[in-house]
Amino acid sequence: MSVTIFSEFESEVRSYCRAFPAVFSRAKGEYLLAEDGRKFLDFFAGAGSLNYGHNDDDMIEAAISYMRKDGVLNGLDLNTSAKAEFIETFRTLVLQPRDLNYKLQFTGPTGANAVEAAMKLARKVTQRPDIACFSAATTACPWGRCR
């Protein structure tokens, strides 16, 4: 498959794909595999909230098992048994051994959710209502979006 379809039908707000003239069809561990057989080392390891590499066998099995049990996939900030199990495990393995008295913050699935949560936390801690902001100040600002 050619990359032409992407440049013809996707917006200019594209970044990483411009540096890789390839169509990726598979991924495993730290590698992305192109349709033409080329293998690329993915230094992002999946990136963002999925930076554990690609298709780890243990994670695949855990995800499939959870879904087969009709586990809650999109619970937003609802209380779920999976979240309770995660909190208890985190408390036992991380917080208690270090005698840390921390609260956990679960944001939504986007960067905007994380930024909003950070702003609310900053306002709460500082007791200041104002937040300074900057335009075009992002970690991922491709040329098409920043012009």
Image (spheres, rainbow, N blue to C red):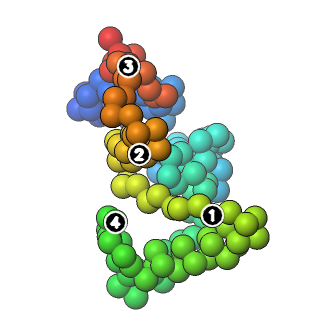
- The residue tagged with tag 2: helix, strand or loop? helix
Q: CA distance from mark 1 to mark 4?
A: 21 Å
Q: Quadrant of the N terminus?
A: top left
Q: Amino acid at mark 3?
A: Phe
Nearer to us in this view, 44 or 77 = 77
Q: Is residue 85 left or right of residue 135?
A: right
Q: Which residue is mark 3?
A: 134
Q: Amino acid at mark 2?
A: Lys
Nearer to us in this view, 105 or 86 = 105
Q: Nearer the viewer, mark 3 or mark 2?
A: 2
Residue 66: image location, x then y, percent: 45, 81
Q: CA distance from mark 3 to mark 4?
A: 29 Å
Q: CA distance from mark 2 to mark 4?
A: 19 Å
Q: Nearer the viewer, mark 3 or mark 1?
A: 1
Q: Are marks 3 and 4 in contact (CB under 8 Å)?
A: no
- The residue tagged with tag 1: helix, strand or loop? loop
Q: Nearer the viewer, mark 1 or mark 4?
A: 1
Picture disc at residue 124: 2
Q: Amino acid at mark 1?
A: Asn
Residue 122: image location, x then y, percent: 44, 40
Say whether disc 3 or disc 2 marks the residue closer to the N-terminus: 2
Q: CA distance from mark 3 to mark 1?
A: 33 Å
- The residue tagged with tag 3: helix, strand or loop? loop
Say whether disc 3 or disc 1 marks the residue closer to the N-terminus: 1
Nearer to us in this view, 24 or 146 = 146
Q: Which residue is mark 4?
A: 77
Q: Are marks 1 and 4 in contact (CB under 8 Å)?
A: no
Residue 1 appears in the rendering: no
